[in-house]
Amino acid sequence: MEVRFTDGTNTVSLYGPASQVDFPVQIAHGFVGRCQGWRDARIDVVTVGTADATVTICYTKIPTSLPFKEWDALR
């Protein structure tokens, strides 16, 4: 399983790729400070085969966000 930000061209992995096994994976990440938006980014969850995954993510889409290259340079 992999959880990632993508705009269809550029991709940044938030978690994984990880082996899918019979126990739940739990991660928590708190952002501190100023978060920059990445224009047109969305969150994708990728699983392999017939794996079943549930992911809950809360984020804010910023309308005046940056293109990927500017966003990537700031991280």
Image (tube, rainbow, N blue to C red):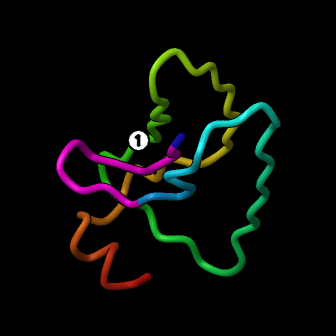
Foreground of the two, 30 or 20: 20
Indicate left or right for 72 with 27 as reference. left
Q: Amino acid at mark 1?
A: Arg
Residue 72's quadrant in the figure? bottom left
Foreground of the two, 74 or 12: 12
Q: Position of residue 68 (x, y in %)?
A: 25, 65
* The C terminus - image quarter: bottom left
Q: Position of residue 40 (x, y in %)?
A: 30, 46
Image point (47%, 70%), residue name: 36
Tally the numbered discs. Answer: 1
Is the stretch drawn in magenta largely helix, strand or loop? strand
Tell me, yes or no, whether the highlighted magenta stretch contains residue 3.
yes
Indicate left or right for 73 with 22 as reference. left
Image point (64%, 25%), residue name: 53
Residue 67's quadrant in the figure? bottom left
Q: Residue furthest left?
A: 9
* The N terminus - image quarter: top right
Q: Position of residue 9 (x, y in %)?
A: 17, 49
Tell me, yes or no, whether the highlighted magenta stretch contains residue 5.
yes
Q: Is residue 20 above or below residue 9?
A: above
Image point (62%, 37%), residue name: 20
The magenta segment is 2-12
